[in-house]
Image (cartoon, helix red, strand yellow):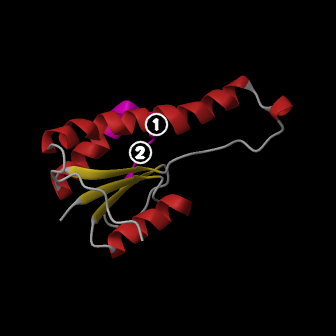
């Protein structure tokens, strides 16, 4: 069975994606800032590379190689642009862009090792 990781999988779009992947028969682990008692739910900040690496290592140990990664973790700051501080802007960039970078780098070596068309196939979109 293939293993998917969904960042931001504790709520919103990430949770919907995780639920769909589960219903399609995939093992699904989630990464989120909010702790959860759900099976294979890991608490990690995607902006913290060490936390991402630790979570991915635990996921691989429990579920095997990660073959699907859905980067759904994201944030926004609902403010008028003129009221947005540079610190707010940097935090949005850190989560929405750097978080994707950290997560992709954490799983990519295993996906590349599986080779083209190996265990890394995309789930059907229906």
Judge the density around disc 2: few (<14), some (14-19), many (≥20) Cα neighbours within 10 Å. Answer: many
Rounded to the nearest angstrom, the CA distance separating label 1 from label 2 is 11 Å
Q: Residue furthest bottom?
A: 23
Question: Residue 26 location, x and y as percent?
Answer: 27, 67
Q: Quadrant of the rendered structure where residue 76 is? A: top right
Q: Is residue 74 above or below residue 35?
A: above
Badges 1 and 2: C-beta atoms under 8 Å apart?
A: no
Q: Is residue 51 visible?
A: no
In magenta stretch: residue 61: no
Q: Earlier in the sequence, mark 1 or mark 2?
A: 2
Which dot, 1 or 2, sits closer to the camera? Answer: 1
The answer to which image quadrant residue 30 occupies is: bottom left
**Element marked by disc 2:** loop
Residue at point 30%, 53% (across, down): 68
Position of residue 116 in the picture relative to residue 47 (left or right): left
**Residue drawn at point x = 32 percent, y = 33 percent:** 105
Residue 27 rendering spot, x and y as whole percentages: 26, 65
Report helix, strand or loop for mark 1. Answer: helix
The image quadrant of residue 93 is top right
Label total for image: 2
Q: Is residue 52 visible?
A: yes
Residue 3 image point, x, y percent: 24, 58
Q: What residue is shown with label 2?
A: 44
Residue 6 placed where, x, y %?
39, 54
Residue range corresponding to the magenta coloring? 42-52
For label 1, the crowd category at 10 Å Cα-Cα, with few meaning under 14, some 14 to 19 and many 20 or more, is many
Tell me the number on the disc at residue 123: none
Residue for point 80% across, 40% down: 79
Judging by the rendered image, the residue that carries numbered circle 1 is 99
Q: Is residue 41 above or below residue 108?
A: below
If the image is split into quadrants, where does the N terminus sit? bottom left
Q: Is residue 47 one of those drawn in magenta? A: yes
């Amino acid at each position: 069975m293939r293993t998917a990781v969904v960042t931001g999988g504790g709520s919103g779009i990430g949770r919907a994606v995780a639920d769909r992947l589960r219903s399609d028969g995939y093992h699904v682990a989630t990464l989120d800032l909010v702790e959860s008692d759900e099976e294979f739910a890991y608490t990690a900040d995607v902006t913290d590379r060490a936390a991402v690496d630790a979570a991915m290592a635990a996921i691989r140990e429990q579920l095997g190689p990660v073959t699907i990664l859905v980067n759904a973790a994201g944030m926004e700051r609902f403010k008028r642009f003129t009221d947005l501080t540079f610190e707010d802007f940097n935090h949005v960039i850190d989560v929405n862009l750097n978080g994707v970078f950290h997560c992709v780098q954490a799983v990519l070596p295993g996906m590349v090792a599986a080779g083209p068309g190996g265990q890394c196939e995309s789930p059907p979109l229906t």
